[in-house]
Amino acid sequence: MKVLTDINNSIAGAEAIASRLAEHGLDSSDRVIYRGRNVIALTDGAEPLCIKSFGVPGAVKGLIYGNMRRPKAMRAFANATRLRDLGFDTPEPVASVCLLSAGRLGRSYYVCRYLEGWNDLRGAEKRPDFANLARSLAAYMNRLHAAGVFMKDFTQGNILFRPDGKGDYSFSLIDINRMEFDVHDRRRLMANFGAVLDTAEGLAVLAREYAALQPDPETTESEAIEIYRQRQKKLWRKRHIKEFIRGKK
């Protein structure tokens, strides 16, 4: 068994939890807060850490992650470090642990600090402060894009926010293993508008605020709205294809 780890040595106990995960995996004292393809748990203690246990990939993907591609846990650790170096918030990385057997990836874990008291963007359009929130989110997206940061999973559940006490909002990104840096193709960066909000009305407000900070606001606004519409059409087609297939069974 080969163990690959990344350790944030500035955090006390980082090496110990990495060793524990490598040897035993999740502990009975770890409180599971999400269980699906991946499992998310919190460690016990005054300052809990968040552990993401990735699902074990199949045989082919396991070999790919073991030999050709960096595993998701290691990418999350590297991306968090890079994001924070660029001045963007994400929970502080603690460790990544990947177990390989015969060149194939098995269990893998990403550990970071736990953020408490933050909301995600689900249902943000229903908030009474949505106009101010959209303005802040638009400015945040402009900063990300100007820095060449492209987060592929830029969705409501992966963008956390909280009021900063000054009439503005702070943002933090989670689930960051699928990211690219030094991206400056505008059309590609603006793909973030496809899934960032739930409704066309909310997206129109965000697009207008984002475009106001661009040198060509009218063109930018229409591009953002079109990106959202195209994604909704794609989702609609996928949903109806699935319904058609289920109806044939």
Image (tube, grey):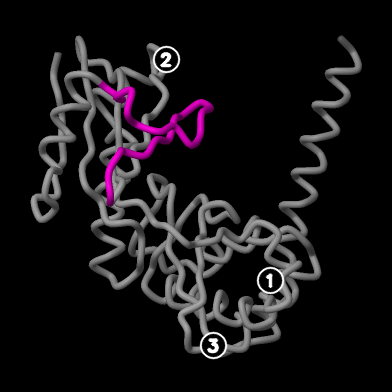
Confirm whether the magenta stretch covers residue 249.
no
Specify whether 20 is left or right of 161: left
Farthest-out residue, front: 46
The image position of residue 46, as x and y in percent, is 28, 50
Q: Is mark 2 on a helix, strand or loop?
A: loop
Q: Nearer the viewer, residue 243 or 148?
A: 243
Mark found first going from the N terminus, 1 or 2: 2
Residue that carries the numbered disc 1 in the rendered image = 223
Which quadrant of the view contains residue 124?
bottom right
Residue that carries the numbered disc 2 in the rendered image = 58
**Marks 3 and 1, how far apart in space?**
29 Å
The image position of residue 84, as x and y in percent, is 27, 65
- The residue under the point 22% across, 21% down is 99
Specify whether 163 is left or right of 102: right
Q: Residue 167 carries which label?
A: 3
Q: Which of 72 and 126 is in front in this view?
A: 126
Identify whether 67 is placed above or below 167: above
